[in-house]
Image (spheres, grey):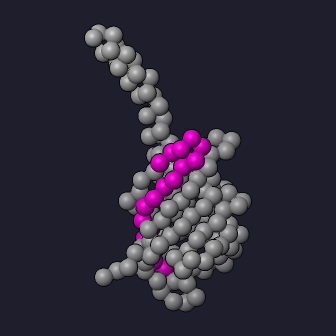
Amino acid sequence: MHRIALAAALSLAVSAPALAAASADEQALMDLENRISDAYLHGDTKTVEASLDERYTLTNSRGLVSHREDDLRELHAGDPKYTEFRTHDMQARIYGDTGIVIGVVSLKGTSGGKAFDADMRFTDTFVRANGAWKMVAAQVTRIEKP
């Protein structure tokens, strides 16, 4: 009986660091989400460029696919202009060197001279390469307001 308890205790002791590392990675991805959101809010093209993989794609709420270059072009042009770009209600999951973050992004601003105000449910996929996380794909779905 004592051997079973010892084996169980050793098993927990060995897995605890792995759980802590996963939690650190999950938090790192959610922190990165917040930095990316702040970069879009302030038109910080350097941060966005550094955070998005060269093959990044976004599937928007209308089902259209855009690319990293499209996001960077919009940031350079300043349209859309955000007054709010806030990620919240996030959860992250890690699968080796792949991470998924789901959550809500609240957006306000103007585009083409027209005001917008929307909440979007998002799923962002990240890959870790050379020790750094890069967003490789994103998908958003509009949350209809009552």
Q: Is residue 120 left or right of residue 73?
A: left
- Residue drawn at (41%, 28%) of the image: 16
Image location (x, y in percent) of residue 7: 37, 16
Q: Is residue 33 above or below residue 63?
A: above
Image location (x, y in percent) of residue 127: 62, 49
User: In the rendered structure, which segment of residues is drawn in magenta?
Assistant: 93-109
- Residue drawn at (38%, 24%) of the image: 12
Dominant SS of magenta comes to strand
- Residue drawn at (60%, 61%) of the image: 137
**Is residue 28 something that shows in the picture?**
no
User: Total number of numbered labels?
Assistant: 0
Name the quarter where the C terminus is drawn: bottom left
Image location (x, y in percent) of residue 88: 40, 61
**Is residue 54 something that shows in the picture?**
yes
Q: Is residue 70 above or below residue 124?
A: below
Q: Residue 99 magenta-drawn?
A: yes
Q: Residue furthest front?
A: 1
Q: Is residue 125 left or right of residue 83?
A: right
Image location (x, y in percent) of residue 25: 50, 42
